Image (cartoon, rainbow, N blue to C red):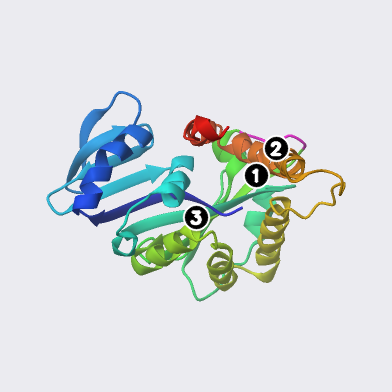
Amino acid sequence: MIRADYVVLTYPRTVQAEALYPQMLGYWLPEPRSQHAMYGFRGYRSGRIFIGERDDRFLIQATGSIAHDVAMRLQLPTEHEISVARIDVQHTMVVADADRLINSCQPSRAYQATRWTRVGEPGSTLYVGSPRSDIRLRVYNKTAESGVKPQVCGDYLRVELQLRNRKADHMFRAIRARAPRFPFLIQLKRMVDSFMYQMVHDSIEEEDKELLFTEELPKELDAISRRKAWIERSVIPALRKILAEEPEYIQTVLSMLDSIDESVI
C-alpha cells in the first residue's frame, strides 16, 4: 500500500475556501491549539498538522499518517488550483534483514547516491538523488528508526519518494485518484537495481490484492454478509499492518467512523 507520509500544499483564498476553513480547523485540529507561523502563513498547529492563512492563500502542512488523510479527504471546489510544494509517499514492507537489503542495493548511476550505516547496531539508510532535486529516494530500516518490529520476524523496510513542485502535484493527484502505484513504481525502477524494484513491486501487488474483493465466499451469503466478510478478512488485516508501524493512525480511523451519519447505521 502506497501512502503519503508528508505534504505541504497551498490553495487560493476563494469564498468557498474561506467557508471551509473553520470546518478544517475543527476536523483536523480538534485539540486545544496554539498560534504559529510557517512559510509566511499565520495559523494553528496541533500534533503533526499545521493549517494557516495569509491574504491570498491557505496552507496545510502534515506529517505521518495524517498527511495521507489530508491528501485523500481534503475537499475543495478549486482542486485544480491546489499547489503541492512537497509530498513524500512511501511503501513499507516486511523483510528478513532490512540492513542487508539496503547495503546490497545498487542505485542507478544516473543519480547522486549516499549510503549511511550505523556502526555496531542496525539502522542503514540509502539516499538516491540530490537533496535539492525534485525527486529523492530514501530506503531505510523502519524497525531500527521506530523500534517497532513485525509480529512474526524480520524488519520493516520503508521505501520513500520525496517529490517537489510539479512532480509533487502529479503524485498528489495520483493519490487522490487512488492510483499512485504506476508513478511510484516507474520512478523507483529508474533509481534502484532490478532486485530491489521487484521486491517492492511484488509487495505492493500482494497488499493491493488483499484489499480486492476476490475471495471465494459462499454464494448463499447475501450482499451485506459478503461485505462484512470482506471487511473482516481483508480490510482489518490490512489495518493491523498499518497500525503496527503507525499506531497514531487509529485516530484517523476513529475520526472517519465518527463522521458516518448515524441515521444510515
Instruction: Give the answer, above or below, for where 9 lies relative to 182.
Output: above
SS state under label 1 = strand
Prevailing secondary structure class for the magenta stretch in the rendered image: loop
The picture quadrant where one finds residue 36 is: top left
Task: Tell me which amino acid carries mark 2.
Answer: Pro
Q: Are marks 1 and 2 in contact (CB under 8 Å)?
A: yes
Secondary structure beneath dot 2 equals: loop
Dot 3 corresponds to which residue? 89
Residue 97 in sight: yes
Q: Disc 2 designates what residue? A: 150
The residue lying at 68 percent from left, 56 percent from top is 208
Instruction: Find numbered disc 3 in the image and state the secondary structure of the residue it sits on.
Output: strand
* Camera-side residue of 137 and 34: 34
Label located before the other in sequence (1 or 2): 2
Q: In front here: 155 or 30?
A: 30
Residue type at the position of mark 3:
Val
| Residue 160, percent from left and from top | 52, 55
Amino acid type for the residue under numbered disc 1? Tyr
Q: CA distance from mark 1 to mark 2?
A: 7 Å
Q: Which numbered disc flags the more N-terminal residue, 1 or 3? A: 3
Image quarter where the C terminus lies is: top right
112 on left or right of 264: left
Q: Which mark is residue 156?
A: 1
Nearest the camera: 264 or 209? Answer: 264
Q: Which residues are magenta?
A: 148-152
Query: Percent x, y for residue 132?
Result: 35, 63
Where is residue 111? Give x, y as percent: 48, 71
Q: Residue furthest bottom?
A: 110
Number of residues whose C-alpha sits closer than 10 Å to that of mark 1, classed few (under 14), some (14–19) or many (20 or more): many
Taking the spot 54% from the left edge, 59% from the top edge, the residue there is 178
